[in-house]
Amino acid sequence: MYHLISLLTGVLLSIMILINGRLTEHIGLFQATAIIHLVGVVFSLAASLIRKEKPLPRTHSPWWFYLGGVIGVYTAVANNFAFGRITMTSIVALGLLGQTLTSLIVDATGWMGMTRRPFRKSTLAGLIFCFAGIAVMLDHSILEAVLAVWLSLGTGISIVVSRSINARLAERIGPLPGSFVNHLTGLPVTVVLVLLTVSKLPAVTYPAGKESWVYLGGVLGVCGVMLFNILVPKISQFHLTVLSFVGQVLAGVLIDLLTGDFAADASFWGGLLITAGIALNLAIEYQAHRKARSEGEPVS
């Protein structure tokens, strides 16, 4: 069940990225990021109060439990810096590479208090396909902008670290309040970024009326963080990374087909390779579990 939810989370993220992209086109990255966080704070606070959940921690937690939202802002800023310096396909591929490597480290070491999940032979098949898909998606642009490459690679690391930190906090206060704190701690950082860049920003018109749907990205962001808060303790970081990516690819293809923008480019073929790898990985694990049960061995 958690593997299916991971796929659906990827679909949700793909829709969120589309909505946030439209808002960014209207008002610019930093203002859009601030509004997304503000909407997320208001929505998650209201949802927590309706569900009669305490939105803020009542007990002491380590200070780094509150850094998930701050680290998340880095992801948006780094991606914006890389955009235009290397191709979008390379940005996605490098981010996935960073996520994959960090996920494997977190799984193997139990870093940040995560459940230790030793590397299995069955994971090797998915890993090979994953790296092959990433290789297909990379192009010559990565040789021309070294800083953009490292920042994009860093976004993959920041995503895994951020969701791990958020999950630790959610263990104490719940998935929804954890999502609230994530957006609340990120909001001041986005406001500072707006203030630092406001003098360089052109005049903008804020969407209204029929275009008001572009403000819903913050709502989907709350749902995405909440789902990650639920999923992180349940499945390996590697599976969560790859399955959510596959969900994003599938949803992206569907959106492109509906809008007439579909192209069988490097992202598509790389995504297919990664999808095949994770499908093979899960099939091998399923057969191993069935064999263990039939032989009366404990199933981990």
Image (cartoon, grey):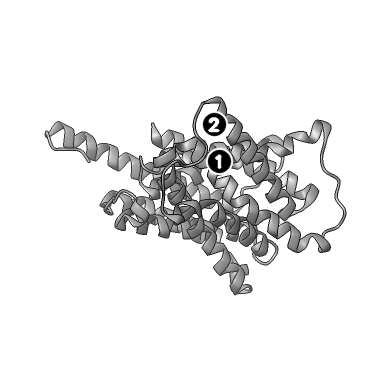
* Picture quadrant of residue 84: bottom right
In the rendered image, the residue lying farthest to the left is 296
Residue labelled with disc 1: 180
* Picture quadrant of residue 167: top left
- Neighbor class of circle 1 (other Cα within 10 Å; few <14, some 14-19, many 20+) is many
Q: Secondary structure at mark 1?
A: helix
Residue 176 % position (x, y): 50, 35
Question: Residue drawn 68% across and 34% down?
Answer: 258
Q: Identify the image quadrant of the C terminus.
A: top left
Q: Considering only order in the chain, which callout, 2 or 1, is on the residue closer to the N terminus?
A: 2
Q: Give the label on residue 48, or none.
A: 2
Question: Residue drawn 60% across and 37% down?
Answer: 220
Give yes or no for contact between labels 1 and 2 (Cβ–Cβ under 8 Å): yes
Question: Residue drawn 51% across and 40% down?
Answer: 56
Residue 83 % position (x, y): 67, 61
Up-down relation of residue 152 to residue 208 (above or below): below
Residue 190 can be seen, yes or no = yes
**For this view, does 196 lie left or right of residue 187?**
right
Q: Name the amino acid type tagged 1.
A: Phe
**For this view, does 156 lie left or right of residue 219?**
left
Q: Secondary structure at mark 2?
A: helix
Up-down relation of residue 105 to residue 34 (above or below): below
Residue 252 can be seen, yes or no = no
Question: Residue drawn 43% across and 34% down?
Answer: 4
**For this view, does 246 lie left or right of residue 234?**
right
**For this view, does 202 lie left or right of residue 217?**
right
Up-down relation of residue 51 to residue 178 (above or below): above
Q: Name the amino acid type tagged 2.
A: Ser
* Picture quadrant of residue 169: top left
